[in-house]
Amino acid sequence: MRHRTHFWVISFLVTTAMLIAGSLSATQQKAQDPDAVCAKCHRQIYDSYKRTPMARASGPAADGLIPGDFVHAASGVRYRLFLQDGRAWLSYQRPDAPPERALDGKQQLIYYLGSGKRGRTYLFQQEGFWFEIPVNWYAKKQMWDMAPHFLQAKEMPLTLPVDAGCLRCHASDVQTPLPGGRNHYAVLPFLYGGIGCSACHGDPSAHLAQNGKGPILNPDKLDAVRRESVCLQCHLEGESTIARSGHTLISYRPGDNLFDNVIFFVHKNTTGPAGRATSQWEALLESKCKQKSGDKLTCTTCHDPHSTVEPEQHVSYYRAKCLACHSDAVFIAKHHPENPDCASCHMPRQSTADIAHEQVTDHRIQRPAGLLVQSAQAPSKEITTVDNLPATAREYGLAYAQIALHGDPFAIQQAMRYLKEAEHSDAVQASDAELHTQLGFLAQRTGDNKLAISEYESALKADPYKSAAAGDLAVLRAQAGDLTDAISLWQSAFKEDPEQLAAGYDLAVVECAQGNAAAAVQALNRVLLFSPDDTRAHAFLLAIKSGTQQCGQR
């Protein structure tokens, strides 16, 4: 989920002990709020901010547990969220299922994410890999349901990785993942949870060292693009988000130009929310208000990040924001005096596709007739950058490659064209593991196995821990009869990244075929540790244990 969040401080040593020994409850992890030092001089702002969704949207799971109990019809899985001995748990069962579909387990929940205004979900860890649970609380409809994109899942998805690119908008001091799995951390994925003061105001060390007289970042004092960047680091996603070469999704720091670090792509001719929950900035760029006001109109023109507007004050508060510009007395008197809610007509809420059961305010701020006309315009298959910013062939190629994962032939063609151009235009690309991995995947998908092998080899040369490249290269090695190298690659991929379930399963198949039943069982048990509802792995393991599958026999 994409909620802005703020945890209580989690004591590093105490949490480490919890993860190792599993003996401490989540409520024992609280320590002093790291922003409390700011309250000494900014008490009013501090107290106001602590009531905002950003500031109270996460914490120890046991403190924010919303009990739940429901059966997901498509998969037949019963999910239950509950407290036991001061700890939060998720249990999952498939009642009365045949042996090959049996499911019965539970997972301790460590943190919750989400203030409850839109929704809530929870995090757990397995062997130092961090995941989001497959169910979400949806506040608008007051219901539990599957996480976005898994509403019709036939199996329980339990390997939803929580990577640094996502956590940058849910936590502070997000840590760099270990080589390999994108959700694998030495101890914790972050040192302090949520959106603290430093997320917008930068490192306060110099300011605090001089008793509040040293420099501190004030976003309002920045030039327009750096001012907007402070908000857009979390409130802009686009259809594809690509880190520029030499950067990561967590390399941005307040005061930087966000677009020097990350570039965002959308489909051409896309208007309004386009089904995404964080599309407000793209929509605002289309609005006449923004186009006529220019840099004077920004996020904080209407939204105060330090406070929350109470529901009963929404209409009057936002009407006042509109009338700050539309101040003609005659206009105000004649323009629908019966309805003071400007947003209900000019910024209607539309359903989102990436967060189920949720709606988003359309920030195009247009006349109702205009909304209908533009919403009917079909988006192009071509993509472009948000605000038409310049982008490289590499960035266009990786953006199209993200879309190509859904099987779009046009996106596949464009991704290959741009990535090949990037590969041959800059010597630096030789060390770009992501470029080579994506180009290898596209080549393999289109049947060019020779190119795919070459690209995967280049990716692993640039980054030996690139598990996606290792897993896919293993398939090609096995097809060519090189089972020794295939096994080695599958072992590496699945060890470094248990999200690579296919690598674990393929490893088990080949080990069994080679007569190594113990190794096959070991691989399948690890698949089921991370994905206990994996039907193929479960059936294969049962076959080996029952003797219906004799390893070594073809």
Image (cartoon, rainbow, N blue to C red):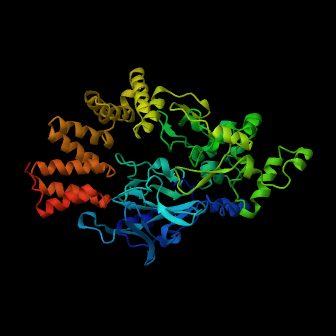
For image coordinates 35% across by 58% down, the residue present is 155
Q: Up-down: is 206 above or below 91?
A: above
- 505 sits to left or right of 335: left
Where in the figure is residue 417, as x and y percent of width and height?
41, 25
- 490 sits to left or right of 193: left
**Which residue is outermost to the bottom?**
85
Q: Up-down: is 121 above or below 426?
A: below
Is residue 87 in view?
Answer: no
For image coordinates 28% across by 39% down, the residue present is 472
Where in the figure is residue 270, as x and y percent of width and height?
59, 37
**Which residue is outermost to the top?**
425
- 479 sits to left or right of 81: left
For image coordinates 10% across by 54% down, the residue present is 551
Where in the figure is residue 157, as x and y percent of width and height?
37, 57
Q: Up-down: is 481 above or below 218?
A: above
Of the pair 401 and 539, the residue shown nearer to us: 539
Image quadrant in which you'd find residue 79: bottom left
Where in the figure is residue 508, as x and y percent of width and height?
19, 51
**Which residue is outermost to the right?**
330
Is residue 374 in view?
Answer: yes
For image coordinates 67% across by 41% down, the residue present is 372
Of the pair 460 and 134, the residue shown nearer to us: 134
Image quadrant in which you'd find residue 488: top left
**Total numbered labels placed on residues in the image:** 0
Image quadrant in which you'd find residue 290: top right
